[in-house]
Image (spheres, rainbow, N blue to C red):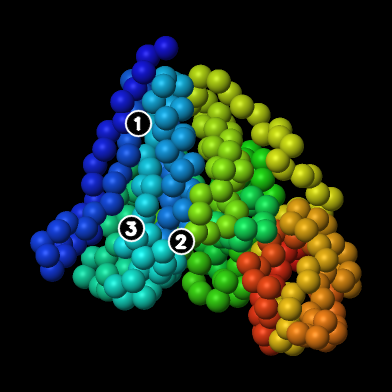
Amino acid sequence: MRKLKREIKFLKIFEGVDLSKRRTPLMILKSPKSGPVIWLCGAIHGDEVTGIEVIHRVFDFLEAGSLTRGSVYAIPVMNPLGFEMISRDNPYDEEDLNRQFIGNPRGSTAERMAALIYSTIAKTKPDFVLDLHTDSSLSVAYTIVDKLKKPKDDAILKKTVAITEKLGLPWAYDYEDHAGYPLEKSLSGALVTNGIPAVTVELGGPYVINPFFVEKGVLIVRYLLSHFNMVRYSVLPVSPFFRPHTLRKPLRFFEEVRSEKSGIVNYRVTPGQVVRKGQMIAKIKNALGRTVETIKSPQRGLVLSLSDQSVSFPGSNLITLAVEDRMK
């Protein structure tokens, strides 16, 4: 088994006032045999760190000789400025890096970083890009596929969905009307808009690396590489991690489970559970222990995540569901 050596490059962000160079590493592994190009991206939100360790583990696995053809590229920490500050956003302009694509090399700090990341990925002409995120500590691993309002090429979306289904995770479409911003401004949306299949993968919660979700993430990447016949040992997406559900596909992302009262949240469902419309999914109690609100599921759906908070206020988002898509 021939071992490979990763190539390390650095993407220059800018120079600090103390003349230090702000940059982020780019990792590359190339098999001697040509083949597909896959990208792995982590920590576009600086507090979402599990994807970093997933990328490290995958490269260790591939470097040992498992990559038989093609190339794998990775930016483990796309937002090093936010990572150092334990911040979701870019701290220099307080902008969400994942809302700035395809970027602007003469724009704000976040726009310049987005332009650098996007151009670096696009020029390699990838066959697929995984953007690794986290949701909450009370969540399942799942995948989001951007459903653009005016796609340039429906074939790219179909290809993205076909590959996403090979990853063994529940997945759901996200729509601009739900997201609240143009989906092509995210990394995955920008790539799909410009003909590159890409998805967002959510792996547990923020702030700390979660070994349970690291293991899931590594398996997901191995499923992807197996699909493209790039690894020595193929892996089929059959795992006790992923609980099957009975909902009719496709699903869509749904976050509109909100509280109307302030109080203490008591969840009555668990991530991965299918709930029926009208089912009680949470209770809100006041400081005296009296129930002030009972929250029921607005639709039949799969519970993807519960919010990482014990307190609610009017309008608080508490639960994320994947519901049957009737917006087709």
Identify the image quadrant of residue 104: bottom left
> Furthest residue to the front?
288
Mark found first going from the N terminus, 1 or 2? 1
Instruction: Classify 10 Å Cα crowding around label 2: few (below 14), some (14-19), many (20 and above).
Output: many
Identify the image quadrant of residue 266: bottom right
Where is mark 3, residue-wise?
80
Residue 47 is marked as 2
Quadrant of image for the C terminus: bottom right
Image coords of residue 144 (percent x, y) = 60, 56
Instruction: Give the structural element (helix, strand or loop) at label 1.
Output: strand
Image coords of residue 252 (percent x, y) = 69, 62
Q: Amino acid at mark 3?
A: Pro
Instruction: Give the structural element (helix, strand or loop) at label 3.
Output: helix
Give the alpha-carbon distance from disc 1 to disc 2, as whole Å: 26 Å
Are the residues at dot 2 and dot 3 in contact (C-beta closer than 8 Å)?
Answer: no
Mark found first going from the N terminus, 2 or 3? 2
Q: Is residue 316 above or below residue 138?
A: below
Q: Amino acid at mark 2?
A: Asp
Image coords of residue 194 (percent x, y) = 42, 56
Quadrant of image for the N terminus: top left
Residue at horizontal 17 percent and vertical 56 percent from the top: 21
Q: Amino acid at mark 1?
A: Leu
Mark found first going from the N terminus, 3 or 1? 1
Where is mark 1, residue-wise?
29
Instruction: Give the structural element (helix, strand or loop) at label 2.
Output: loop
Residue at horizontal 39 percent and vertical 25 percent from the top: 63
Q: Nearer the viewer, residue 51 or 98?
A: 51
